[in-house]
Amino acid sequence: MSIYREQLPQSRGTLFLTDGGIETTLIFHNGFDLPFFAAYPLLDSAPGRTALREYYESYLAIAVHGHQGFVLESPTWRANRDWGAELGHSESDLDRYNRLAIELLESLRKEFSVPESPIVISGCIGPRGDGYQVTSRMSGEEARQYHSHQIAAFADTNADMVSAITMTYPEEAIGITLAAQQAGIPAVISFTTETDGRLPDGTILKDAIERVDEATDNGPAYYMINCAHPDHFSQALEAGEDWVKRIQGIRANASRMSHDELDACEELDDGNPEELGLQYKQLRSAFPSFSILGGCCGTDHRHIGEISHHCH
């Protein structure tokens, strides 16, 4: 059974870390070819499983050394029906991958968990469409139906929670939250923003959070922002506002490039790890609710090490 599903320890305000940009690390540092940016097929091969384990181990070592908690996110951002079909995987195949992913994280938790560094296992859910732009959109009910299959698979494992990463519009986030409520597992919603601090569909961040909370009776355990540089989303934040206090996690990009620029870039922009760590320190000082800190595209263990050092 799960350990923390009934009470997530990262909701108490103590510092928790997450990993960085798993796909960019595997592609640019480890040399893997990941069609459609999907990491989960690596679970099928011994070299792939070894690479995933070593990837997570590098971050867990940082958290244990710093006596910080860790949210261990599964490599399943693309393991939903539409993206799975692009890779030739059926729904039963995806069930197997989602379960294998949680089993891998369970083994890592068993190896690294110490009282000073609680490890929370999260089933990662990605958007149905592209993570950078909204080409089509679902209603909240359509999104609930679409994502319920993957969420139910996670709920049937020892995952403590699910995280919807890189959400581009509110309705999909609403549907995911409703599906998680139905399955009896906590959900976290992480929106991405453009350089103007708005969601890719143009929604103001404040409005997106308030719409999801209203439609789900404050359903998400908390919110996050990911796949954008702090320079992009900090302008949208207002200290002291109730909606900002609902944001507890940040997983920023290393690069200041826009989503369009990143899409066109053939080389990895890994930014400046120390600078990013200092920016996180400033954000955490201005917004004390930001207690779950990690990275997204272009970040790796160096960035998380700096974040751990400056935000401890």
Image: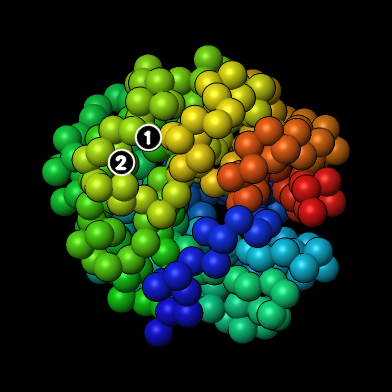
Q: Residue at x 49, y 26 (%)?
A: 193
Q: Which residue is mark 2?
A: 213
Q: Residue at x 61, y 25 (%)?
A: 234
Q: Nearer the viewer, residue 88 or 133?
A: 133
Q: Position of residue 307 (x, y in %)?
A: 77, 47
Q: Is residue 311 left or right of residue 240?
A: right
Residues under numbered marks 1 and 2 in contact, where contact means CB atoms less than 8 Å apart: yes
Q: Residue at x 24, y 46 (%)?
A: 216
Distance, label 1 to label 2, CA atoms, is 6 Å
- The kind of residue tagged 1 is Ile
Q: Is residue 55 visible?
A: no
Q: Which mark is residue 93?
A: none
Q: Position of residue 88 (x, y in %)?
A: 31, 55
- The kind of residue tagged 2 is Asp
Q: Which residue is mark 1?
A: 209
Q: Is residue 58 left or right of residue 79?
A: right
Task: Count neighbours of disc 1 (C-alpha within 10 A) and say few if under 14, some if 14 to 19, many if 20 or more.
Answer: many
Quadrant housing the N terminus:
bottom left
Q: Is residue 75 visible?
A: yes
